[in-house]
Image: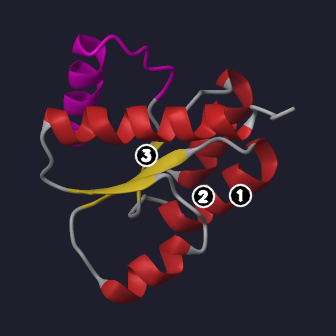
Amino acid sequence: MIVATDLKIRLGIMGYNIVGIASEGKDAIKKCRETKPDLILMDILLKGNIDGIETARIINKLFNIPFIYLTGNYDKAIFKIAETTKPSSYLTKPFDSTELKTAIKTAINTQKSKYIKRK
């Protein structure tokens, strides 16, 4: 929750509206259903029965919301599994506000471009 609170403050300063914070996968899925966010920052390690990777997989299937993984440790095996969920980006903790802002803008712009059709 300390990281989530820090992120909420940083994102608020950047002008983003935080619609929810969840520490368990089932709560994250519920919040997505209720709030339909434009982007999710998903920690790979979550409390509860389902981790961040499985939670992202479910959210992606149900709502098609782009997400950025956050992780405290780099593990090639975990990243290989996480990659199958097609995240917009990864941020390894600790990360600075510039890295965060860049990852968010890239994820949002990539998602918008998916909805543009060429004539």
Q: Which residues are magenta?
A: 1-20
Q: Is residue 115 above or below residue 69?
A: above
10 Å neighbourhood of mark 2: few (<14), some, or many (≥20)? many
Which residue is depicted at the point 52% across and 33% down?
Answer: 109
In the displayed structure image, the side of residue 27 where residue 92 appears, left or right: left
Camera-side residue: 22 or 38? 38
Whole-percent x and y of residue 43?
38, 54
Camera-side residue: 46 or 89? 89
Furthest residue toward bottom: 77
Disc assigned to residue 23 = 3
Whole-percent x and y of residue 99?
21, 42
In the displayed structure image, the side of residue 11 where residue 16 appears, left or right: right
Decide: marks 1, 2 in contact (CB < 8 A)?
A: yes
Could you give the CA–CA distance between mark 3 and mark 2, rounded to whole angstroms?
11 Å
Residue type at numbered disc 3: Ser
The residue mark sitting in front, 1 or 3, is 1
Q: How is the image coloured?
A: secondary structure
Q: Quadrant of residue 32?
A: top right
Q: Is residue 11 above or below residue 22?
A: above
Name the residue that disc number 1 marks: 58
Could you give the CA–CA distance between mark 1 and mark 2, rounded to whole angstroms?
5 Å
Whole-percent x and y of residue 72?
21, 63
Q: Is residue 1 above or below residue 54?
A: above
10 Å neighbourhood of mark 1: few (<14), some, or many (≥20)? some
Give the quadrant of the C terminus.
top right
Local SS, label 3: loop
Furthest residue toward front: 119
Disc assigned to residue 55 = 2
Local SS, label 1: helix
10 Å neighbourhood of mark 3: few (<14), some, or many (≥20)? some
Counting residues from the start of the chain, the first of labels 1 and 3 encountered is 3
Give the quadrant of the N terminus.
top left
